[in-house]
Amino acid sequence: MVVFTVYFFLYGRLYLSLSGLEEAILKYASARGNNSLKAAMASQSIVQLGILTVLPMVMEIGLERGFRTALGDIIIMQLQLASVFFTFSLGTRVHYFGRTILHGGAKYRATGRGFVVRHEKFAENYRLYSRSHFVKGLELMVLLICYRLYGSAADDGISYALLSFSMWFLVLSWLFAPFLLNPSGFEWQKIVEDWEDWSKWISCRGGIGVPSVKSWESWWEEEQEHLRHTGFIGRLFEIILSIRFFIYQYGIVYHLNMTTSSRQGIRLSIVVYGLSWLVIGAVLIILKIVSMGRMKFSADFQLMFRLLKLLLFIGCIVTIAMLFYFLNLTVGDIFQSILAFMPTGWALLQVHVMALIICQWIIDDWVEFICVEMIIGQISQACRTLVKGIGMWGSVKALARGYEYMMGVLLFAPIAILAWFPFVSEFQTRLLFNQAFSRGLQIQRILAGSKKQA
């Protein structure tokens, strides 16, 4: 319910700002001198739900050992990033509870209970938390950025900070908690090894017998496995939930300078919205052409492949120049369009995957209906190969790999920058093993314990 409230609040705020309702309400309040209405539009309670849930623990410790001790324990917990950890674990429960409700497939997940001192690689953290935390965290971050750009109620930095600080804390916890709580997570040598391992993993092609820890393609196939076994309601809900990105795209396009500078109003905004879909289609076609050209020309006809890329580049430049000249496109519109197209591309990816899975599901069911049991498997596999062989599945997989690569770079860049400073790694070690240091223990002995026992 907490996470649902965050999504509901952000999408509601974004709708008010992108539709113009928020600005109209503020103008009405200013004209009538209704300061209470203006304050209500930018209100956000300082006392968050997370603080309220801490009060029972404060009362329990206070009654047992005194309220001064309870206050000290709460401060120590915050310094040890307890809030970051529990906020991150909240995202884990939300993701798997939601997936189980929609698609079923509940099963036991074995978890360790030991004192973890082993460094987890970046690729392993990415495989574990990409769908449950990173994708959702980036979506919320885009919503917060858009509300800062288009919102009218929180027009200054202080108002925006008071309005969104709790949601920014949720976003940062979901994105960086696995690396902040990872031993030796900011050690430079570990960072270099993690990047090489992750680059090798995401570029490796999958296949029969290739595990998910060795290839991104195998891992991506496993991540779509629950959609193959879900029912019609689960598939329908996945498609409906993806529509929110298309509505968000229209709201961004509605605020482009090439739309607002004209007096034709809603008619031109719909035309520009249609044009934005043409741009998305053109980008997908260009990616497909480059992919096919790489397979056919890159090995034996490198000059032909380079000429193909040059022609595509010139065509893109000419198209953008025409948009600048005829439709009053600005540089700000380009960045806003990128902000709108990125979630739209992700939604298209999800809907495309769902559509191909539904096609395979229908074909398999039809084959099972008309064929005898001995040849069901062979014909089903042949039909699935036919569906994938039309070129759709390869394009979807290439687009998905591009999105995964961008997400990985966005997550890895801040970690690599912090790893340049040696004191960050030392501070993290002191932070994670604070109790061990306070008792006079040495982390090196803990790390070397397993080797001596072996």
Image: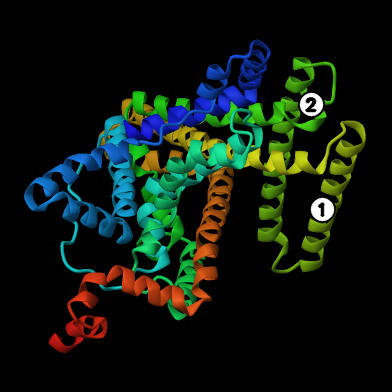
Q: Write the residue at 43% across / 77% down.
A: 187
**Nearest the camera: 97 or 140?**
140
Residue 248 coordinates in the image, percent (x, y): 59, 29
Q: Looking at the rendered structure, which numbered label has been put on residue 313?
A: 1
**Nearest the camera: 115 or 400?**
115
User: Where on the picture, by quarter, is residue 367?
Assistant: top left
Compared across the picture, whether 371 is left or right of 72 comes to: right
Q: Are marks 1 and 2 in contact (CB under 8 Å)?
A: no
> In terms of secondary structure, where does tag 1 sit?
helix
Mark 2: amino acid: Thr
Residue 140 coordinates in the image, percent (x, y): 49, 40
Q: Residue furthest left?
A: 64
Q: Looking at the rendered structure, which numbered label has been put on residue 229?
A: none
- Quarter of the image where the N terminus is located: top left
Q: Write the residue at 79% across / 57% down.
A: 309
Mark 1: amino acid: Phe
Q: Using the image, determine if residue 202 lies above or below residue 86.
A: below
Mark 2 highlights which residue? 259
Residue 62 coordinates in the image, percent (x, y): 13, 47
Give the class, few, some or many, for how many residues have Cα within 10 Å of label 1's Cα (few <14, many ≥20).
few
Q: Using the image, determine if residue 76 lies above or below residue 262.
A: below
Q: Write the residue at 19% across / 69% down.
A: 115
